[in-house]
């Protein structure tokens, strides 16, 4: 007898658990079955220092992040900063992965703790598509304090520029200029805008697409002896 498998919708929802958290999940984390329950919360739902570090590890090593880094490497590989072929691509991928790890570490572990900000991603509570879009795009510059109040996302912005500066330690000499460094930081923040919109609407689109597919598929009849 084959055990029941979770539905595709449930799998898609679970895949989004690390990226987004609702206000209710923040205030009452133990009532929700998401990966955030494993991160380490205080009694009010605020992340503890160990929770921030676990979030950094989870976010950096997630399949979504590794795939995004691979796509960014493919896009930048045209400039051949580390040479051609597999060796050049591998070095560039390692550099991009180091960029992602340092930025996540600065934002999630160091700066968000020092500035008392919540580094988790929040989905909009509005029913308006336009407002949800604006909230998602604006998450680059707007975040929550540990107490749940909206504030300027200084931890992400500062982490982006610190990571871009740190990357000069391993990027080719031509990419270490002030202009190139600022350009890398700016592009990363712009990519955050698009990724925020994707995180906001992707779960809804997946539910609709997978829901329609499940309705169109006829039920499987159990085998008869």
Image (cartoon, helix red, strand yellow):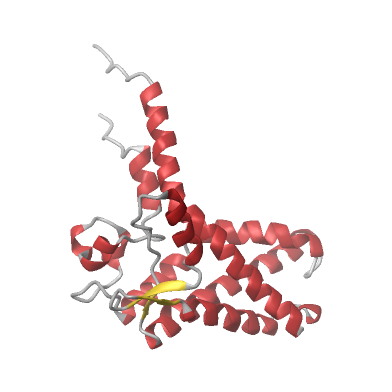
Q: Position of residue 23 (x, y in %)?
A: 28, 63
Q: Is residue 113 visible?
A: yes
Q: Is residue 82 above or below residue 201?
A: below
Q: Position of residue 160 (x, y in %)?
A: 57, 77
Say whether residue 56 is left or right of residue 65: left
Residue at point 81% right, 67% down?
Answer: 83
Q: Position of residue 140 (x, y in %)?
A: 50, 69
Q: Is residue 210 above or below residue 141?
A: above
* Quarter of the image where one finds residue 162: bottom right
Q: Is residue 176 visible?
A: no
Residue at point 75% right, 61% down?
Answer: 77
- Most extreme residue toward the bottom is 114
Say whether residue 107 is left or right of residue 23: right
Quadrant including the C terminus: top left
Residue at point 38% right, 58% down?
Answer: 123
Q: Position of residue 178 (x, y in %)?
A: 74, 84
């Amino acid at each position: 007898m084959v055990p029941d498998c979770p539905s595709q919708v449930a799998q898609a929802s679970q895949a989004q658990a690390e990226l987004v958290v609702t206000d209710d999940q923040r205030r009452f984390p133990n009532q929700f079955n998401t990966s955030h329950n494993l991160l380490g919360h205080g009694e009010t739902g605020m992340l503890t220092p160990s929770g921030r570090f676990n979030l950094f590890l989870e976010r950096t090593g997630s399949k979504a992040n590794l795939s995004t880094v691979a796509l960014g490497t493919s896009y930048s590989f045209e400039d051949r900063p580390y040479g051609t072929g597999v060796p050049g691509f591998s070095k560039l991928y390692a550099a991009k992965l180091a960029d992602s790890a340092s930025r996540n570490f600065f934002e999630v572990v160091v700066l968000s703790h020092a500035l008392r900000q919540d580094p988790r991603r929040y989905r909009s509570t509005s029913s308006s598509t336009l407002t949800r879009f604006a909230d998602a795009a604006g998450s680059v510059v707007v975040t929550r304090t540990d107490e749940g109040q909206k504030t300027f996302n200084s931890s992400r912005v500062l982490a982006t520029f610190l990571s871009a500066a740190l990357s000069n330690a391993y990027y080719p000499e031509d990419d270490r200029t002030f202009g190139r460094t600022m350009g890398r930081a700016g592009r990363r923040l712009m990519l955050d805008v698009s990724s925020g919109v994707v995180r906001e609407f992707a779960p809804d689109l997946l539910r609709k697409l997978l829901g329609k597919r499940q309705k169109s598929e006829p039920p499987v009849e159990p085998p008869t002896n």
